[in-house]
Amino acid sequence: MDARWERTPGNTRRTLAEALATITIAFVDAGAVYHDSRVLRRAVYSWALNKKARVNEPREEWRAAWSGLIIGRYPSRNSTTLWCCVVLLRGLDALCRKLDDTLPAAKTTKRKRAAVNEVFADAVERSYFTHNPLIGLRWAAPAVDDEVDPDCVPNSVQVRWLLEAVRQLPGRGPHLYAFFGCMYYAGMRPAEVINLRKSQCRLPRTGWGLLNPKGGIVTAGKEWSDDGAGHETHPLKRRSAKTTRPVPIPPVLVRMLIEHIARFGVTADGRIFQNAAGNYIDAAAYGITWGRAREATLAMDETCVEPGEASI
């Protein structure tokens, strides 16, 4: 973690720490784990793996948990290979469980395993291992049914109902009407919509318009960012920092954005969408609003539509 800290964004630091904290606890000898595994995990995640946090002394309960951490030892030289496989499998299995012992989303397990694999690859480069022990290991994550159900994807009529329901909701509803419109009509990720600026929009009075999104606002957590801010601006997925993605938008979205800007204005840095305090829109906020729109609009057998899926 320390070697990569300076060249890694805060969100990636957090992802790596989550994976390493999970698998580190699983590597500990049975019977040597601190009596409260949640405290031990928090000590590893929030302090031991956080270069920024280690500037300060850990909390007393974290210190007690960390001092009791005893990494498993090889039983004997002849059984090293067997021990390694057993411990590695135990660690990989731990990646497939959340703290409440339920299964995480398949992409979460995949992301954590990739992070662990990267650490072992780095260990090989530094001559701690002669080869990556994960290579050739026969292991597969449990199947998780988290694919989008085609029956849950709303049709165009349902989308209009949902967007209108959002607009009619009190409080933040009108603020998020065009926000969800961008997700549907322009196929944008929530993080990209949050970062959308007026200068990136061509909004003619008639006909089609054009958006040029450039990156997204990602929640990193102030504990993991260099400047203590809770959010970071990332480039578009799998693209260079200065790359934009031109997106033609239909007249209906052009009108939504024009009306939104006229009613709510933009932030000092030109962002179109903001919360009541002028800050970034929180994922929990738009998630709650979308849930209320579903309840107000769709029948019981139609309410499986989630924001951020293929449907929106």
Image: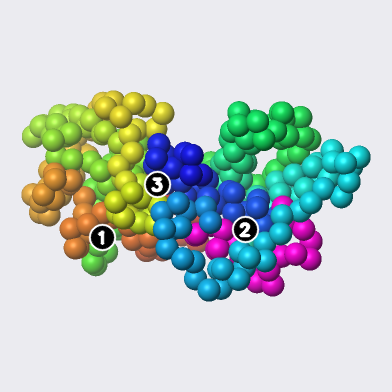
Secondary element under disc 3, as helix, strand or loop, is: helix
Residue contact between numbered discs 3 and 1, judged by CB atoms under 8 Å: no
Q: In this rendering, is residue 241 above or below 92?
A: above
Q: Which of the marked residues, 3 or 2, is nearer the chain's N terminus?
A: 3
Q: Give the secondary structure at mark 2.
A: loop
Which quadrant is home to the C terminus? top left
Quarter residue 236 falls in? top left
Percent of width and height locating residue 254: 17, 38
Residue 44, percent from left and from top: 57, 58
The residue depicted at 42 percent of the width and 46 percent of the height is: 11
Residue 43 is one of the magenta-drawn residues: yes
Name the residue carrying label 1: 173
- Could you tell me which secondary element the residue under label 1 belongs to? helix
Q: Nearer the viewer, residue 244 or 31?
A: 31
94 displayed left or right of 30? left
Question: Which circle marks residue 10 in the picture?
Answer: 3
